């Protein structure tokens, strides 16, 4: 006789934020997807996590981008939050953008950069119940 247990849903702890990026006014949907991929890859590299843990959505009209980094480990999430709040995060991500933008058209790769990062944390004492916002400017 086999007994199966239902997997318990794991709680995830997000670090979310908004970043302002320079995006050409005439960017296509395909180019926008590539920009989102480069940003997700670059943020993942900077945080030392898998790209599957990062989601980035860019508003082409405003350049405002939302990112979410998720983990099932609240300690890792706190470390990600601290890292993103560090004043060098923007500089490091911009450096990594240049290194990871080989698939972007040259006109986009030249101008793609983060101007500002606003970070939100939605957990406190291992519970998702508090929102703290931080802003870092380049």
Image (cartoon, rainbow, N blue to C red):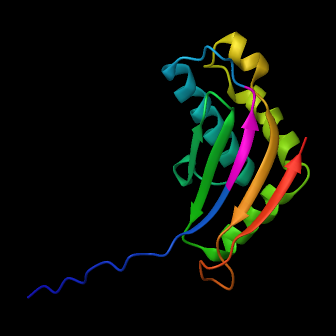
Above or below, 13 against 55 in this view is below
Residue 40 in the image: above or below residue 26: below
Q: Residue at x 78, y 17 (%)?
A: 110
Numbered circles on residues, count: 0
Q: Quadrant of residue 68?
A: bottom right
x then y, percent, for residue 81: 75, 64
Residue 5: % across, % down: 24, 84
Question: Which residue is located at x 54 percent, y 71 percent?
Answer: 72
**Image quarter of residue 24:** top right
Which quarter of the figure has residue 38? top right
Counting from the top left corner in percent of width and height, residue 9 is at 38, 76
Magenta-highlighted residues: 17-22
| Residue 20 part of the magenta segment | yes
Front residue of this view, candidates 50 and 68: 68
Q: Main secondary structure of the magenta part?
A: strand
Residue 36 versus residue 135: which sits nearer the camera?
A: 135
**19 left or right of 74 in image:** right
């Amino acid at each position: 006789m086999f007994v199966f247990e239902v997997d318990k849903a794991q709680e995830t702890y997000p670090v979310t934020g908004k970043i302002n990026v320079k995006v050409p006014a005439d960017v296509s949907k395909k180019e926008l997807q590539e920009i989102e991929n480069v940003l997700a890859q670059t943020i993942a590299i900077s945080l030392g996590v898998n790209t599957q843990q990062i989601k980035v959505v860019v508003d082409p009209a405003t350049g405002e981008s939302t990112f979410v980094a998720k983990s099932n480990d609240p300690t890792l999430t706190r470390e990600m939050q601290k890292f993103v709040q560090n004043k060098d995060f923007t500089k490091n991500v911009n450096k990594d953008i240049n290194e990871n933008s080989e698939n972007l058209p040259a006109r986009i790769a030249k101008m793609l950069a983060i101007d500002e990062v606003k970070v939100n944390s939605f957990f406190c004492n291992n519970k998702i119940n508090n929102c703290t916002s931080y802003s870092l400017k380049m």
